[in-house]
Image: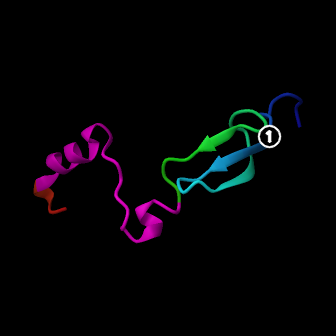
């Protein structure tokens, strides 16, 4: 394996939307940094059965629905 070709792999903290935290290894950020998630398994409709709503940032969902309204979605 060549030296200095791989990124540094270190421990970071992950903060879920409900406030819980856990540690994992990652190449993101620096040792000890905290990554705050906007969507995670506790809030994403794929895991919650569709009970949560996704935020419509900048009207993207509305634009998509308007663009493809006639296709039977």
Region in magenta: 41-69
| Label 1: element kind | loop
Snapshot quadrant of residue 48: bottom left
Instruction: Report the side of 18 relative to 44 (left or right).
Output: right
Indicate whether 48 appears above or below 27.
Answer: below
Residue 50 image offset from top left, x and y in percent:
36, 67
Instruction: Examine the structure image and report whether residue 31 is included in the region drawn in magenta.
Output: no
> Of all residues shown, which one is farthest toward the front?
19
Q: Which residue is mark 1?
A: 9
Q: Residue 51, located in which quarter of the rendered image?
A: bottom left
The location of residue 5, given as percent across then percent down, is 81, 30
Q: Could you say where residue 26 lies in the image, as x and y percent from the top left?
A: 73, 44
> Dot 1: few (<14), some (14–19), or many (≥20) neighbours within 10 Å?
few
In depth, the one of 62 and 64 nearer the eye is 62
User: Residue at point 66% right, 49% down?
Assistant: 14
Q: Furthest residue to the left?
A: 70
Specify the quadrant that holds the C terminus: bottom left
Question: As rendered, which of 52 and 46 lies closer to the eye?
Answer: 52
């Amino acid at each position: 394996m060549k030296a200095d070709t791989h990124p540094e792999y270190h421990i970071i903290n992950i903060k879920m939307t409900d406030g819980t935290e856990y540690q994992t290894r990652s190449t993101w950020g620096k040792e000890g940094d905290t990554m705050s998630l906007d969507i995670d398994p506790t809030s994403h409709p794929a895991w919650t059965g569709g009970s949560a709503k996704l935020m419509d940032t900048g009207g993207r969902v509305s634009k998509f629905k308007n663009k493809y309204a006639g296709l039977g979605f």
